[in-house]
Image (spheres, grey):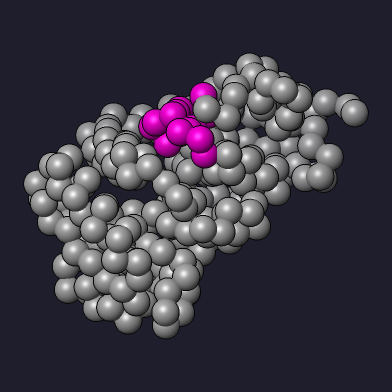
Amino acid sequence: MNDIKIVIVDDESSIITMLQMVLRKEGFQHIYTAASCREALEVARRVRPEIVLLDIMLPDGSGLDICSRIREYGNPHILFLTARASDLDVLTGFAMGGDDYITKPFNPLEIVARIKARLRRQDAENSSVMLIPPRSEAVKYEFGHFVVNEAEGELLVDGQPVSCPAQVFQLLLHFCKHPGIVFTRTQLYEAVWGIDGLGDDSTVPVHIRRIRERIELDPGNPKYLLTIRGLGYKLAKGPQES
């Protein structure tokens, strides 16, 4: 972790100080800060970080607006920090390119846990690149009108490829590997993001919605990815009638 560069973008000095202290205690030494959109872009261009903790409401603009520009400098993991916690806000954050969405107030140890989980997952993905099977042996999961090709990272709906962000695809893939099994939000968060939900109530539902928008004929009345009231979610082995 000594070589991981982290940029904290927030206009509240108390938050920056708190995160710096906790991150350094956890072994992260290369920590940079910015208090505005302009400073964030300058720091990202200069240090090319692996992780960016990005506040949304900044004095000179929105962190949402600079997310894609920050990605031009090394394609870092971007974790939004914000006091805005509605489903629409979360969905917008992911749609603009964020990798995670953390609402204020937060426990700084939660931030550390999510950063470490992302780095572990990245290391695991990098170490398994050579283990991907040839295309002729690619594992495919077929559910009615949609097909998930694990090896090629591809979702086909009615025979046509459909764009699917990485974590949306990973969540769908997890369901495909365990059809008919009900998972709680916490179980899904741990399986895809690498740690417990730690009180996160919106990330999984937002991604469930994004899956439904891709695989369901009527996302508002899903037949495949079902909500099991009081328990969680499951992927039906075939389309279910209401």
The image shows residue 190, relative to residue 49, as above or below, that is above
| Residue 181 position within the rendered picture, expressed as x and y whole percent measured from the top left | 63, 17
Q: Residue at x 39, y 31 (%)?
A: 195
In front of the other: 168 or 53: 53
**The C terminus - image quarter:** top right
Q: Position of residue 91 (x, y in %)?
A: 60, 55
Q: In terms of image quadrants, where is residue 221?
A: top right
Q: Residue furthest top?
A: 181
With 220 as the anchor, is 17 left or right in this view? Answer: left
Tell me: 194 left or right of 242: left
- Of 93 and 201, the residue lying toward us: 201
**Residue closest to the far right:** 242
Q: Which quarter shows the N terminus? A: top left
Asked whether residue 127 is in view, the answer is yes
Whole-percent x and y of residue 113?
32, 37
Which residue is painted at 75% across and 42% down in the image?
216
Q: Relative to 147, is 70 on the left or the right?
A: left
Q: Which residues are magenta?
A: 187-200
Instruction: Tell which of 105 and 121 is nearer to you.
Output: 105
Q: Quadrant of residue 95?
A: bottom right
Q: Quadrant of residue 239?
A: top right
